[in-house]
């Protein structure tokens, strides 16, 4: 999982204690995924069990520093070497809503798409303001992350446009029949 | 609305455009009403044929509404003579298109200075203003290059400089990032945004949501109508 590999990646640079791992992870990932310290210690425990990290010196509790082992470096290299396996799409409420609305005769799908588009566009504008403010020299990781969110949000808007266009095409041939009847 | 639109950089008041007459007429736009405040960047999105280009042509006084009014800084475009309209286009409005923006026989700075020189401004003053505009879009060092010696992104930056040089306060941009790769397109949007943050006004027509997102407001057109108005229009029709 990514927390395990992220901790290994940080420890590969230098031995670090638990809290340092938490703040270093959050700094590098622009604070997008806050980690709780408990999760860091649980993960460190598992990494130690598997021989990927080991405690260093005589500190204990929060002061305990950890270092990556040779086995840990191998695991990290493996992670960097291999492309990320994509999870199956999670249950997406918007997609489900649009599909159900498109199947239901009495629901105005265009209105649903319109309203969603406004909200999704507002999100995209917010993200773009973050991008505008980000300093590309000092905040590169944050900027890259914002770019990723922007493209995912843009994909949702593109999908909404496509839904609307396909629904319009579906609606067109039905119209003259209605007028005749 | 009347009072507000006097203070707006651009206002559409129930403006519509119908091409042709009778059965063969094409309803291209409207009625649409909206204001653009000074310093605002507005993006217009919508599928092909939704009326985006018609809207931009009306805003730029390149075309007249069939009904309703279009006001630039409070001036009703319909009340202006052809001569005054030409002056307004030269002094107040700058255009940025997808391509074919610059005259190939003139250098970057000559292209930017052209509207000022046509307006009778002394050449030395026009050059100084044009240089300042080019510097604002980070093109000062390439001011003496010809368009053919510039990249697509650099040419668009020159076009943005020309669109807001001197007293020009309203920039109208039609897919200005269309032919550019995503990083260069983003730079063009960033520069457009910066000019608006500095007080200029812009209306941007684009297909690309990530470029529209640089705007303060995004308006969606469908079948010539603003989509947030459509619900109201339908309700009105149902009542009628």
Image: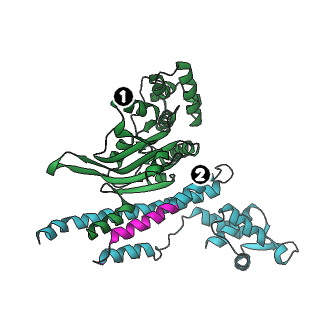
Chain colours: A cyan, B green
Q: How crowded is mark 2: few (under 14 residues within 10 Å), some or many (20 or more)?
A: some
The residue beneath circle 2 is A132
For the stretch drawn in magenta, what is the main secondary structure?
A: helix
Q: Which residue lies furthest to the left in this view?
A: A180
Q: Where is residue A119 in the image (x, y as percent from the top left)?
A: 47, 65
The residue sitting at 35% across, 49% down in the picture is B52
The label number, if any, that marks residue B83 in the structure image: 1
The residue range painted magenta reads: A104-123
B94 in magenta: no
The label number, if any, that marks residue A104 in the structure image: none
CA–CA distance in space, label 1 to label 2: 40 Å
Q: Residue furthest right?
A: A58
Residue A48 visible in the current orientation: no
Residue B30 visible in the current orientation: yes
Q: Position of residue B198 (x, y in %)?
A: 59, 42
The residue sitting at 45% across, 36% down in the picture is B94
Chain of the residue on which disc 2 is drawn: A
Q: Is residue B125 above or below residue A123?
A: above
Corner quadrant of residue B176: top left
């Amino acid at each position: 999982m990514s927390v395990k590999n992220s901790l290994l990646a940080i420890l590969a640079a230098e031995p670090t204690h638990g809290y340092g791992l938490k703040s270093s992870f959050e700094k590098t990932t622009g604070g997008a995924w806050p980690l709780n310290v408990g999760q860091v210690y649980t993960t460190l425990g598992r990494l130690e069990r598997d021989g990927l990290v080991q405690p260093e010196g005589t500190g204990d509790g929060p002061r305990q520093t950890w270092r990556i082992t040779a086995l840990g470096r191998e695991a990290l290299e493996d992670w960097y070497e291999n492309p990320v396996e994509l999870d199956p799409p999670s249950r997406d409420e918007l997609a489900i809503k649009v599909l159900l609305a498109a199947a239901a005769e009495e629901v105005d799908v265009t209105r649903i798409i319109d309203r969603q588009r406004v909200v999704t566009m507002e999100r995209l504008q917010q993200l773009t303001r973050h991008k505008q403010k980000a300093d590309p020299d000092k905040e590169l990781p944050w900027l890259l992350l914002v770019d990723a969110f922007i493209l995912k949000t843009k994909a949702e808007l593109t999908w909404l446009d496509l839904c609307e266009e396909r629904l319009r095409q579906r609606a067109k041939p039905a119209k003259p029949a209605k007028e005749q009847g | 609305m009347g009072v507000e639109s006097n203070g707006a950089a651009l206002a559409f008041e129930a403006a519509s455009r119908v091409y042709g007459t009778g059965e063969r007429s094409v309803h291209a736009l409207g009625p649409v009403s909206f204001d653009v405040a000074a310093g605002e960047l507005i993006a217009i999105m919508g599928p092909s044929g939704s009326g985006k280009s018609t809207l931009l042509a009306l805003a730029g006084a390149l075309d007249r509404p069939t009904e309703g009014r279009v006001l630039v800084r409070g001036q009703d475009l319909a009340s202006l003579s052809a001569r005054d309209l030409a002056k307004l286009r030269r002094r107040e409005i700058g255009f940025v298109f997808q391509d074919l923006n610059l005259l190939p026989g003139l250098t970057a700075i000559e292209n930017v200075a052209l509207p000022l020189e046509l307006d009778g401004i002394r050449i030395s003053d026009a050059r100084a203003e044009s240089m300042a505009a080019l510097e604002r879009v980070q093109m000062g060092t390439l001011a003496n290059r010809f368009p053919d010696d510039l990249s697509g992104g650099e040419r668009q930056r020159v076009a943005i400089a020309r669109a807001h040089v001197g007293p020009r306060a309203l920039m109208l941009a039609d897919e200005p990032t269309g032919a550019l790769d995503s990083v260069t397109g983003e730079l063009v949007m960033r520069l457009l945004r910066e000019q608006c943050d500095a007080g200029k006004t812009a209306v941007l027509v684009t297909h690309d949501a990530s470029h529209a997102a640089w705007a303060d407001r995004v308006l969606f057109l469908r079948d010539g109508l603003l989509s947030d108005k459509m619900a109201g229009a339908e309700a009105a029709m149902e009542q009628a």
